[in-house]
Amino acid sequence: MEDYDLVIRGGTVVTALEQFRADIGIRAGRIAAIGTGLDGAARIDADGLLVMPGGVDTHCHLEQLRPEGGADEESFVTGSTSALAGGTTSAISFAVQFKGCGLGATLNEYRRRAAAAMIDYSFHQIITDPTEAVVAQEIPQVVAAGIRSLKVFLTYDALRIDDRAYLAVLAAAHRTGALVTVHCENYDAIAWRTAALLADGHTTPKYHPWSRPEVVEREATYRAIALAELVDQPIQVFHVSCTEVAEEIARAQARGLKVWAETCPQYLLMTEHDMDRPGFEGAKFMCSPPPRGPDAAAGLWEQIRRGTLDVISSDHSGYSYDGPAGKRINGAEASFRDIPNGIPGIGSRLPILFSEGVSKGRITPSDFVRLTAFNPARLFGLAEKGRIAPGADADLVLWDPARRMTITNSLLQHRIDYTPYEGLEVTGWPVLTLRRGEVVMRDGVVQAEPGSGRFLARGPYDFIRPLGRLPHGYDAAAAPA
Ligand code: URP
Ligand code: ZN
Ligand code: ZN
């Protein structure tokens, strides 16, 4: 009998710490050995290639239900296809609570839709209306079902919660052992500036960043952190766009708080000037917070190097450019206020980051692995993901560091009809993806069966345990309801 089902031979194995030449032996979908001279029933030659953990994308919107009915255009099948083509094997998407509704009904619908996925997946539960029943009964049920992260928005009409409601969510997470992720922008400040801009006739996508400048994000980030400190609840700040926001986070981290933060490729490659393109074209680049001025990316790379920002996710959003359900859902003449926010990126995240980061010498291959796989898996309690170690799931991507490619939308294989990175030249490309030991992408051809992805139930884990630091030692979250 052969020792292993499959051996990846002779590649350069890249872990979160180091890189070395080795073979990887895989048995029953897991990494069984890392060594030399391994042999198995099947072999893949990785000579000249990097062998890295499959990407873990902990922020992407797949088939997210919309309050007006229907769902975002990127389905779990098309989103999985793009992910696998780009070397990502696991993702955390979102289940939204609609205001006035409970959590149960929509969660079942997400589980039903996600059953078609080919990547392994979990959800963040978005809380928009933390009623007594939601807080006391439903959040504990959702967390017990393995959805161990709650997401809140401090802006957007349909989703935002105020400070009191945010405290209620933080307290529920504190009691149940969940992580809270936060979209930090000040709702009222944006509404105030938007009203002024529109009254002045400034309606085009160019004015989207004007409506929500850096200070709006910084204020909300400061508040999100301060209230989390009050409750002693760990949080992750989503999609940090600029240095002044990262500096708020660094200050909190320096005080020992459990505050983590992600950024996304769009903030490293795009600027606010991308929204100032002729006609409606700027809508392709609209997301929130918006990309900032031309110096912002350099500042973010510095914060990545310092470790303030330790996860890079895609924030993949399902809005096409031409279709009626996407950017033009309110018409091609819609003002920036009424154009949906978000850009696609689940498939381009790793190639773009490798090229801009590793190939351009800004980060090492191990940094890349930490930012895109190891850290997100550790933060969100995915112990079997994001690592190359005996016992871990054999989710691997074989990467040609020298391959030069030009990004085109068709290469990305998502359903969205555009990529903001069209024409971008990259160095480094994924040539083969393994999910739990199975080849699911070879040379750009995705060969996974719909429904072969697994739900990742996330149990309790130490990394996000509260610090036990409470003002006056009083745990208000534990008080009787
Ligand atoms: O503009 C963005 N980021 N759209 C997706 C939803 C969100 O805010 O994460
Ligand atoms: Zn957001
Ligand atoms: Zn998002």
Image (tube, rainbow, N blue to C red):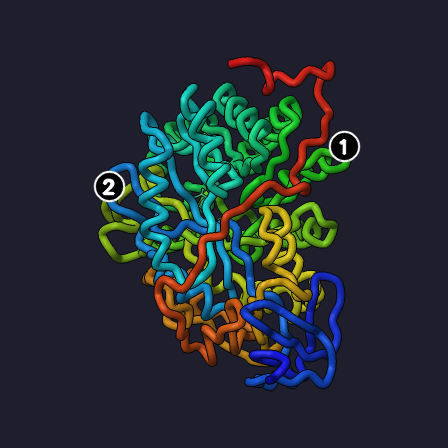
Amino acid at the residue labelled 1: Arg
> Looking at the picture, how far across and down is residue 350, in whole percent?
55, 64
The residue that appears at 71% across and 78% down in the rendered structure is 22
Q: How many marks?
A: 2
Q: Quadrant of the N terminus?
A: bottom right
- Give whichever of discs 1 and 2 has the lower sequence position: 2
Residue 355: quadrant of the picture: bottom right
Disc number at residue 303?
none
Residue density around tag 2, few if under 14, some if 14–19, many if 20 or more, within 10 Å: few
Amino acid at the residue labelled 2: Gly
Q: Is residue 136 above or below residue 303?
A: above
The residue that appears at 61% across and 80% down in the rendered structure is 7
The residue that appears at 52% across and 55% down in the rendered structure is 57
Q: Which residue carries the number 1 mark?
A: 255
Left or right: 409 as drawn, with respect to 36: left
Q: Which residue carries the number 2 mark?
A: 69
In the image, 416 versus 419, the foreground residue is 416
Q: Is residue 470 above or below residue 281?
A: above
Left or right: 446 as drawn, with respect to 415: right
